[in-house]
Image (spheres, helix red, strand yellow):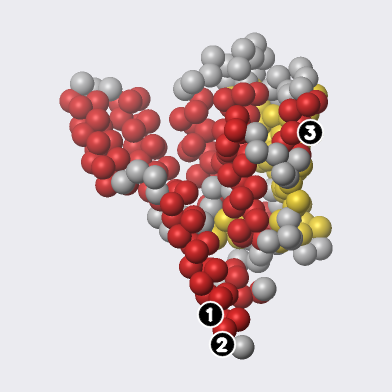
Amino acid sequence: GHLVEDIRVEELNLRAAELRVLQEQINPHFLYNTLDTINWKALEHDEFEISNMVGALADILRYSIRNPGDMVSIGQELSWLERYTMLQKEKLDQPLMIKTEVPEKLMGYRIHKLLLQPFVENAINHGFRRMTKPCCIEITMKLFGAQLYIRIRDNGCGLPQELVNELNNKNSSDGNHVGVANVRKRLELYYGEEHEMYFESREGQGTSVHLFIRAVRGGGQNEDYHSGG
């Protein structure tokens, strides 16, 4: 049994290292110091809006860089996403609304940090280009037995069917959608075979991402995610 155990530990170490590389591509201290400098400059010029944005950005970075890949409560993740979208709003010409339909009892359940962010980012960067109506992203979560179902839906411009097929093809290495490839990789690292992800879209109407992952209840203790096999 020792050999199997050693290989298992080795595999986990490798996974952890891969995640670190994925999420620490630039030295965070350099970023914080730079943001701090920009913040002081903004305040010197009474630019309070800029100062707030820089502050929000520092919070976002701190959250995402500290213990990458950690489990956090769904409540924490959603409040982080709110800050993130506040900054993203500045790029859009249209108002942006985030609607969350998450039962209160699910707020304490745990998911991996930044699991939802790439989908929100895709909606903002691709779905809402050239929008003339208000932009809306809906995040819905439900419990189905041992699985947590998450849907992220936008009312953006939608995707051509070929692209949807491409995104739903696990073996596709479509370079344009690095974000999606990255999420797929992370889902496999975190949940093994126990997950499902697929896209639905209609041109002119919007896109939905459907995720099914293992539901993890929040407990006081630090759940070791890999102990369950």
Q: What residue type is labelled 2?
A: His
Point out residue 38 in the picture as x, y percentages from the top left corner: 24, 30
**SS at mark 3?**
helix
Query: Which of the two residues, 176 or 116, is positioned nearer the viewer here?
Result: 176
196 displayed left or right of 93: right
Q: Residue placed farthest to the left in the image?
A: 44
Q: Position of residue 17 (x, y in %)?
A: 45, 60
Question: Which residue is at the front of the view, 204 or 6?
Answer: 6
The type of residue carrying mark 3 is Asn
Q: Which amino acid does label 1 sit on?
A: Asp
Residue 88 image offset from top left, x and y in percent: 50, 28
Tags 1 and 2 touching, CB below 8 Å: yes
Q: Name the residue under label 2.
A: 2
Q: Which residue in the protein does label 3 denote?
A: 165
Question: Which badge, 3 or 1, is on the more N-terminal residue?
Answer: 1
Vertical side of 186 occupied by 118: above or below:
above
Identified at 59% across, 52% down, the residue is 186
| Helix, strand or loop at mark 1 | helix
Q: Nearer the viewer, mark 3 or mark 1?
A: 1
Assess whether mark 2 and mark 3 are in contact (beta carbons under 8 angstroms). Answer: no
Mark 2 surroundings: few (<14), some (14-19) or many (≥20) residues within 10 A: few
The residue tagged 1 is: 6
